[in-house]
Image (spheres, rainbow, N blue to C red):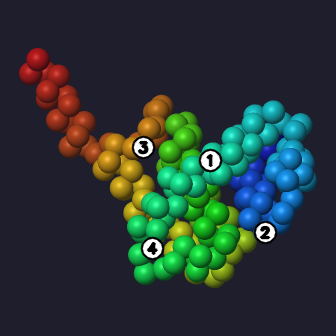
C-alpha cells in the first residue's frame, strides 16, 4: 500500500504533537502514530526521518522562526502552527528531493484542517520569508529538475556566459 504524502505528514505532525504534550517515550509515540505506516516502507521511512530531523534541528529551526515572528514569542504561536513550521523548514533544509512550494502548500492545507482559521495565512507568510532567506544565504539544497525556480534572466545570463567562453 502506498500512502499519500499528506497523510504521512499528518502522522508526523501527530507524533510531534504527542511528543510536545506527553511524557511518553519516543518509541511509544512512534508506535502509536508513525509506525502505523509500516506497510509502506518509503512512507514509513520518510515519516520517521522527518520526525527525527524536526527534533534534531530545533536549535537551527526555531531561531529562523523567531526572526520572522519578531512581534511574537515562540511560546505564543499555536502549537500546531509551530510544529508545521518546524516540519516544513526541515523539509526545506534536509529533503533535497521535495520542492519548497510543495512543502509550503502541504503545510497550508494541513493547517486548514488542524489549526485555526487564520493559521494558513500566518504559516504561508512565515514560510515564504524563511524560504527567501535560505535561498539568499545559499542554505537551500535542492536537486533535480523543477525544484528551484530559476528566473529567465538568470538562465539567459548563464547561456550568454557559456557562449562567451
Give the distance between the C-alpha atoms of the residues marked 3 and 2, in whole angstroms. Answer: 31 Å
Q: Which residue is mark 2?
A: 21
Q: Earlier in the sequence, mark 3 or mark 4?
A: 4
* Image: 130 above or below 163: below
Q: Is residue 20 above or below residue 50?
A: below
Pointer 1: what residue? 56
Residue 26 pos. (x, y %): 82, 51
Circle 1 crowding by C-alpha within 10 Å: few under 14, some 14–19, many from 20: few
Q: Position of residue 28 (x, y in %)?
A: 89, 51
Q: Is residue 93 visible?
A: yes
Disc nearest the viewer among 4 and 1? 1
Residue at position x 75%, y 37% in the image: 45
Nearer the observer, 133 or 153: 133
Element at badge 4? loop
The numbered disc on residue 140 is 3
- The residue that appears at 42% across and 69% down in the rendered structure is 68
Residue labelled with disc 4: 69
Q: Residue at x 70, y 49 (%)?
A: 51
Amino acid at each position: 500500500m502506498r500512502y499519500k504524502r499528506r497523510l504521512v505528514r499528518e502522522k508526523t505532525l501527530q507524533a510531534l504533537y504527542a511528543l510536545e504534550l506527553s511524557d511518553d517515550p519516543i518509541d511509544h509515540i512512534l508506535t502509536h502514530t508513525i509506525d502505523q505506516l509500516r506497510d509502506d516502507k518509503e512512507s514509513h521511512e520518510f515519516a520517521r526521518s522527518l520526525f527525527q530531523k524536526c527534533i534534531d534541528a530545533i536549535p537551527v529551526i526555531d531561531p529562523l522562526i523567531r526572526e520572522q515572528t519578531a512581534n511574537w514569542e515562540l511560546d505564543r504561536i499555536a502549537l500546531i502552527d509551530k510544529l508545521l513550521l518546524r516540519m516544513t523548514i526541515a523539509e526545506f533544509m534536509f529533503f533535497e528531493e521535495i520542492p519548497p512550494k510543495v512543502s509550503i502548500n502541504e503545510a497550508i492545507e494541513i493547517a486548514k484542517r488542524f489549526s485555526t482559521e487564520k493559521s494558513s495565512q500566518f504559516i504561508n507568510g512565515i514560510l515564504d520569508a524563511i524560504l527567501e532567506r535560505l535561498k539568499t544565504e545559499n542554505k537551500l539544497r535542492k536537486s533535480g529538475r523543477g525544484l528551484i525556480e530559476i528566473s529567465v534572466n538568470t538562465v539567459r545570463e548563464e547561456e550568454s556566459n557559456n557562449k562567451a567562453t
